Amino acid sequence: MMVERQLNHTNTEQVVATLPPGTLSFSTNAGLTVPGSTMGFKVYVKLTTGNEKGSNAITVTHTDDGPP
């Protein structure tokens, strides 16, 4: 299971989506609906041991009037 989470300015996390194993791509505009808006994201993977492993955080900025 892969879980995409967004990080907001208070460093709290919110689940954006939970995806089935084998998913290789995912698109969202969560937190990025207005040009100039910025959001941090991390991807978490649930391991076979039941633990979660998180990726490094990335920052995405919505740069125009089209989809982010």
Image: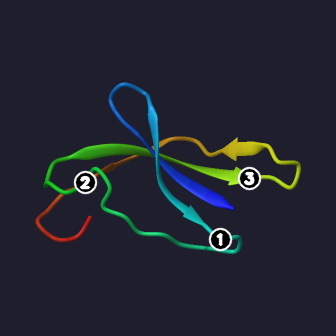
Residue 31 rendering spot, x and y as whole percentages:
28, 50
Which residue sits at x=48%, y=69%? 26
CA distance separating discs 1 and 3: 11 Å
**Element under label 2?**
loop
42, above or below 65, in the image:
above
Task: Residue under label 2, please give it.
Answer: 32
Which residue sits at x=72%, y=44%? 53
Q: Is the C-beta separation of discs 1 and 2 under 8 Å?
A: no
**Element under label 1?**
loop
* Type of amino acid at the residue the image marks with label 1: Pro
Left or right: residue 23 versus residue 12 is right
Quadrant of residue 48 in the image?
A: bottom right
Left or right: residue 35 versus residue 42 is left
Residue reaching furthest right? Answer: 49
Q: Nearer the viewer, mark 1 or mark 2?
A: 1
Q: Earlier in the sequence, mark 1 or mark 3?
A: 1
* Label 2: few (<14), some (14–19) or many (≥20) C-alpha neighbours in 10 Å: some
Residue 36 rendering spot, x and y as whole percentages:
15, 48
Q: Nearer the viewer, mark 3 or mark 2?
A: 3
Q: Which mark is residue 2?
A: none
* Type of amino acid at the residue the image marks with label 3: Lys
CA distance separating discs 3 and 2: 26 Å
Residue 20 vs residue 37, the one in the foreground: 20
Image quarter hosting the C terminus = bottom left
Which residue sits at x=82%, y=48%? 50
* Type of amino acid at the residue the image marks with label 2: Leu
Image quarter hosting the N terminus = bottom right
Task: Residue under label 1, please give it.
Answer: 20
Task: Residue under label 3, please give it.
Answer: 46
* Label 3: few (<14), some (14–19) or many (≥20) C-alpha neighbours in 10 Å: some
Residue 49 rendering spot, x and y as whole percentages:
88, 48
CA distance separating discs 1 and 2: 24 Å
